[in-house]
Image: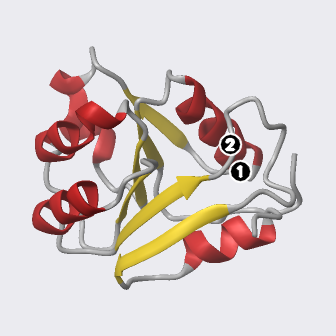
Amino acid sequence: MNEAQLHLNGPIVIVGGAGKMGAFFKRLFEGAGAEVRVLDEDDWNSADALVQGAKLVLISVPIHLTVETINRLPRLSDDCILADLTSTKAAPVEAMLAAHNGAVVGLHPMFGPDTQGLEDQVIAYVEARKGDDWLAEFLGASGAI
């Protein structure tokens, strides 16, 4: 899928990882060597354990559930990036900034989940609160523009 590799000292958690776009990013991150955990609608009782030590929590749920889902998240470590995959940014970014003290990134993939990889794919990247740039570097190294 790509040559980019991730060497993180913690997992990536995809909230909604069983959905099509969540599954796309799960394959992408696992292909780069990351540990990926999925938090889906039936997993909220285990949410604290699933997000423990996470370096990225990626929200990949239907847009009408995004803010509610962000508000349900347990406290994340300050070195975690909190990101979403919605097409609208104002409400999700505002909710992420309120819910998390660390880096906040709004992502909008300009492609569908049937894409094979990120080569020459466009991803809008809105950095609402700056943090470690590993996510932007990884997406670029994976071919995204």
Q: Can residue 90 be seen by looking at this rendering?
A: yes
Give the residue at x 74% y 72%.
140
Q: Mark 1 packing: few (<14 Cα in 10 Å), some, or many (20+)?
A: some
Return the residue at label 1.
Answer: 33
Judge by depth and name the residue closer to the eye, 50 or 138. Answer: 138
Q: Are marks 1 and 2 in contact (CB under 8 Å)?
A: yes
Return the residue at label 2.
Answer: 30
Residue 95 location in percent, x, y? 16, 58
- Quadrant of the drawing holding the C terminus: bottom right
**Disc 2 element:** helix
| Figure coloring | secondary structure
Find the distance from the CA under tag 1 to the CA under tag 2: 5 Å
Give the amino acid type for the residue marked by disc 1 in the picture. Answer: Gly
143 sits left or right of 73 in the view: right
Residue 115 versus residue 84 in the image, above or below: above
Judge by depth and name the residue closer to the eye, 53 or 98. Answer: 98
Q: Mark 2 packing: few (<14 Cα in 10 Å), some, or many (20+)?
A: some
130 sits left or right of 138 in the view: left
Give the residue at x 71% y 61%.
122
Give the amino acid type for the residue marked by disc 2 in the picture. Answer: Glu
Q: How many marks?
A: 2
